Image (tube, rainbow, N blue to C red):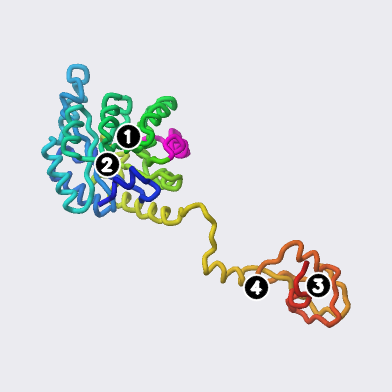
C-alpha cells in the first residue's frame, strides 16, 4: 500500500498520491461502494476516500431540511465504513475518510484511520484543526473558498507538522476560468517541506496533469461508476477508465520531471556527432587560395562549429589543393 508516512514527512522522496474520492457516488449502497473500490484498484488509485457523518450532527434539520434528507439517503454508517476499509486494505489499497461531524472525527482518531481528510468547508473549523495538531495526527486539508490571507494563516499553523495542503476551487464542477494552477507553487513556498496537492473539481484530466507537472504530490479526484449521470457529484467525477489514463500519464510525467539538472544521455552523445554540422569545402579549392564564404558549406555530420571557428576560416589558405568535401578542420587543425 501507499506509504503515507513518507509523503507527509519527506514528500520529495514520495511518488504522487492518487486518491479516488468516492464521496456520495455510492448512493449509500455497500455493494456499490465495494464495486467502486474494485474499480479504483483497477484504475491504479493509491487510495479511496469516503465521507463520514452522522446526519443529525452534520446538517441542522430545521434550517436545512432538504440537505439533511439528501445526505441521510447517502449515509454509510461508521461500522459499514470499517467493513469497507478492511475490504479495501485486504485488496492492497488504502482507505481513509473525511469526517463531517465531531463524533466521526473522534471515531477515526480512536481507530487510527489516518490520514484524516479535512474538507474545504471545514478548513475554518479551527477547533478540529487545533486538536489534530495538538495530537500530532496526520491529516490532509483542502482550501477551496479560502481567501489568500486565510490560506497564509492556515499555512503558518501547519508548518512543520504531519499535514498536507490541497489547492481547490469549490465549485461542482469548477469552470476552467476559476483556476490558477500556478497557485500550487505559491502554496509550496508557504510550506516548503510539506506536500502540496490538488483537489480537482474540474472536468477532464488536463488540470490534474498540469498540477503534477507543477509539483503537486497529491491528486484527489471524485470517482464514479456512473459517468453518464449528471446529478450530485457524478458530473465532475472520473470514470475508472479516465482515472486510469490520468494516473498512467502522470506516472510518465513524474519519471520525466527529474531534479532540474541538465544531463545528456549516451544516445544523445552519439546523435550529436551525426546531427551537428561542420565546415567542408564546397568545391575544389586551389592551393594558396584564400577561403571565402562561398567556398564553405556547413554539412552533417559534425560536432558543431562555433561562430568564432567559422569566421576564423575566412581568408585562410592552404599550400595544398583542397578537394571538394574536405573537412576544413582537418586542413587547418585547431581553429582559433
Residue 55 in the image: state x and y as whole percent.
Answer: 16, 27
- Please give left or right for residue 109 compared with residue 324 in the image: left
Circles 4 and 1, Cβ within 8 Å, touching? The answer is no
Residue 180 appears in the picture as rendered: no
- Classed neighbour count for the residue bearing mark 2: other residues with Cα under 10 Å, few (<14), some (14–19), many (≥20): many
Which residue is identified by label 1? Answer: 141
Q: Which mark is residue 301?
A: 4
For marks 4 and 2, the one nearer the N-term is 2
**SS for dot 4:** strand
Q: Nearer the viewer, residue 28 or 84?
A: 84
Residue 144 in the image: state x and y as whole percent.
Answer: 36, 31
For marks 1 and 3, the one nearer the N-term is 1
Which residue is identified by label 2? Answer: 21
| Magenta stretch in the rendered image | 174-192
Residue for point 79% across, 77% down: 283
- Please give left or right for residue 163 compared with residue 36 in the image: right
Residue 63 found in image quarter = top left
Quote the CA–CA distance across marks 4 and 2.
55 Å
- Classed neighbour count for the residue bearing mark 1: other residues with Cα under 10 Å, few (<14), some (14–19), many (≥20): many
Quote the CA–CA distance across marks 2 and 1.
14 Å
The vertical placement of 64 against 221, above or below, is: above
For marks 3 and 2, the one nearer the N-term is 2
Residue for point 84% across, 82% down: 320
Quote the CA–CA distance across marks 4 and 3.
18 Å
Q: Is residue 186 magenta?
A: yes
- Classed neighbour count for the residue bearing mark 3: other residues with Cα under 10 Å, few (<14), some (14–19), many (≥20): some
Which residue is identified by label 3? Answer: 295
Residue 223 in the image: state x and y as whole percent.
Answer: 27, 44
Amino acid at each position: 500500500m501507499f506509504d503515507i508516512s513518507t509523503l507527509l514527512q519527506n514528500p520529495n522522496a514520495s511518488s504522487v498520491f492518487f486518491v479516488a474520492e468516492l464521496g456520495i457516488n455510492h448512493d449509500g449502497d455497500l455493494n456499490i461502494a465495494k464495486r467502486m473500490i474494485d474499480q479504483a484498484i483497477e484504475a491504479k488509485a493509491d487510495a479511496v476516500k469516503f465521507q463520514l457523518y452522522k446526519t443529525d450532527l452534520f446538517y441542522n434539520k430545521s434550517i436545512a431540511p432538504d440537505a439533511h434528507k439528501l445526505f441521510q439517503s447517502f449515509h454509510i454508517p461508521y461500522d459499514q465504513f470499517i467493513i469497507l476499509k478492511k475490504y479495501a486494505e485486504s485488496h492492497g489499497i488504502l482507505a481513509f475518510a473525511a469526517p463531517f461531524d465531531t463524533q466521526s472525527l473522534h471515531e477515526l482518531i480512536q481507530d487510527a484511520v489516518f490520514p484524516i481528510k479535512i474538507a474545504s468547508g471545514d478548513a475554518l473549523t479551527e477547533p478540529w484543526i487545533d486538536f489534530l495538531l495538538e495530537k500530532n495526527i496526520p491529516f490532509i486539508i483542502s482550501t477551496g473558498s479560502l481567501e489568500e490571507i486565510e490560506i497564509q494563516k492556515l499555512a503558518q499553523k501547519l508548518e512543520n507538522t504531519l499535514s498536507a495542503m490541497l489547492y481547490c476551487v469549490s465549485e461542482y464542477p469548477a469552470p476552467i476560468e476559476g483556476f490558477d494552477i500556478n497557485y500550487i507553487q505559491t502554496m509550496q513556498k508557504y510550506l516548503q517541506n510539506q506536500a502540496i496537492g490538488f483537489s480537482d473539481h474540474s472536468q477532464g484530466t488536463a488540470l490534474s496533469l498540469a498540477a503534477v507537472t507543477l509539483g503537486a504530490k497529491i491528486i484527489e479526484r471524485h470517482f464514479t461508476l456512473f459517468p453518464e449521470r449528471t446529478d450530485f457529484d457524478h458530473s465532475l467525477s472520473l470514470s475508472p477508465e479516465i482515472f486510469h489514463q490520468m494516473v498512467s500519464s502522470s506516472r510518465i510525467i513524474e519519471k520525466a520531471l527529474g531534479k532540474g539538472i541538465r544531463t545528456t544521455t549516451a544516445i544523445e552523445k552519439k546523435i550529436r556527432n551525426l546531427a551537428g554540422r561542420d565546415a567542408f569545402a564546397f568545391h575544389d579549392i586551389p592551393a594558396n587560395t584564400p577561403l571565402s564564404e562561398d567556398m564553405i558549406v556547413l554539412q552533417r555530420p559534425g560536432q558543431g562549429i562555433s561562430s568564432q571557428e567559422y569566421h576564423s576560416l575566412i581568408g585562410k589558405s592552404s599550400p595544398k589543393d583542397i578537394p571538394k568535401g574536405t573537412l576544413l578542420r582537418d586542413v587547418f587543425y585547431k581553429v582559433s
